[in-house]
Image (spheres, rainbow, N blue to C red):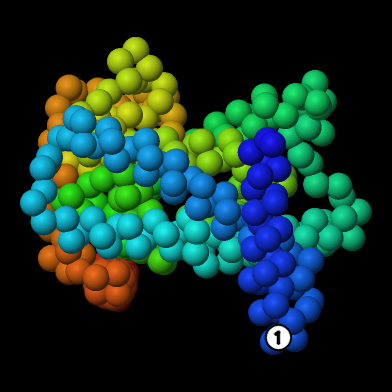
Amino acid sequence: MSLDRLFSNLAGYMDQYAVLPILYHFHWMEWDELSFDWCLVCIYGLFAVIVTYAVCLPMERWRPVEHWPDQKAVLTDVFYTLLNRVGVIPVITFLLFYQAQTWFTGWVVDMGFIPPTLDSLVPGLFGHPIITFWIYALILDCADYWRHRLSHSFRAWYALHALHHAQRQMSFWSDDRNHIFDDFITFVWFFVIGLLIGIPPLQFPLLMLGLRFIESFSHANIRMSFGPLEPILVSPRFHRLHHALRAAGRGSCNYAGVFSIWDVIFGTADFSNAYLPTGDAKAPEALATGTYLEQQLCGAKMFFQSLAKSWHALGSRRPT
Ligand SMILES: [Zn+2]
Ligand SMILES: [Zn+2]
């Protein structure tokens, strides 16, 4: 049985025995056409977490950069991963994307315009889904590079992103450790780009999982570089330099998520052979070792304080 088939079957069971009974019980039948897709999103997410765990854990044991006697801070990152990959967030994201894309496409067609897709823009690509996928992946990753780089450039935005950098025990669980406002900005960012380039929801889920795997792997506590592939693919050593204590905030390096070529092209790559301690020296302790809620509250407080500071700075610059 192919992997796709297995996932569909598992999602089918989950839908039939867990989700549909709940929808019927609460008279939410209007969702029953989409509930199978929700289940599929959860199953793919769960599979991704299991594969990431199975590959990264032995490697972290084999060649760790750091040893931590107390790993309580890592547990919070596990919670972030489960919430973001298997829990409610992917379902909400998918649902929002699906609804908004249906609405947007309908609106655009009503205006007498057929939205472009990559296949329609480059007719030669039709029937080459793998090439189309790589083009989509490169476009999205380039957009992600700029989103990430900008999040280090604006004070209020970095106040949110500091949560990701505050972790001193960086492991393969740390990829999803983000403030929920920051996740929302990321969602809107990809959402707009996804609509503009016409990505169909749930297309290429397996390949998307592969890209997410690279992102988790690059956070792992592993002493490893990709040798001659370093300028192409983000390795644990490459991303660790981005998380290095000295680089937190402005003037950091290595912003790419999957393809390090963006750092090479835009002049922010650092290929030093160094494994530095990670964290953000300026981040409050609650952001580094607090519980999920403490981190979210602390991040929100820092965000609003920075917004107020930027607002005042803008006001004092205005002529009176
Ligand atoms: Zn960053
Ligand atoms: Zn990171």
Query: Is residue 175 or residue 33 the one in the foreground?
Result: 33
User: Among all residues in the image, which is located at the extreme top?
Assistant: 228
**At 80% from the left edge and 26% from the top edge, which residue is drawn?**
127
Q: Is residue 218 visible?
A: yes
Would you say 78 lies left or right of 2 here? left
The residue labelled by disc 1 is 25
Query: Is residue 246 or residue 296 the one in the foreground?
Result: 296
At which x and y percent is residue 95?
65, 64
Q: Is residue 265 visible?
A: no
User: Among all residues in the image, which is located at the extreme left?
Assistant: 69
Would you say 179 lies left or right of 100 here? left
Question: Measured along the vertical axis of the image, is residue 71 above or below residue 170?
Answer: below
At which x and y percent is residue 186?
48, 55
Query: Is residue 101 or residue 215 the one in the foreground?
Result: 215
- Quadrant position of residue 116: top right
Please state, as top left, top right, bottom left or bottom right, where the C terminus lies in the image: bottom left
**At 27% from the left edge and 33% from the top edge, which residue is drawn?**
59
Would you say 115 lies left or right of 315 here? right
Question: Measured along the vertical axis of the image, is residue 158 above or below residue 126?
Answer: below
Q: Secondary structure at mark 1?
A: helix
**At 76% from the left edge and 71% from the top edge, which residue is drawn?**
32
Which amino acid, by three-letter code, is at mark 1? His
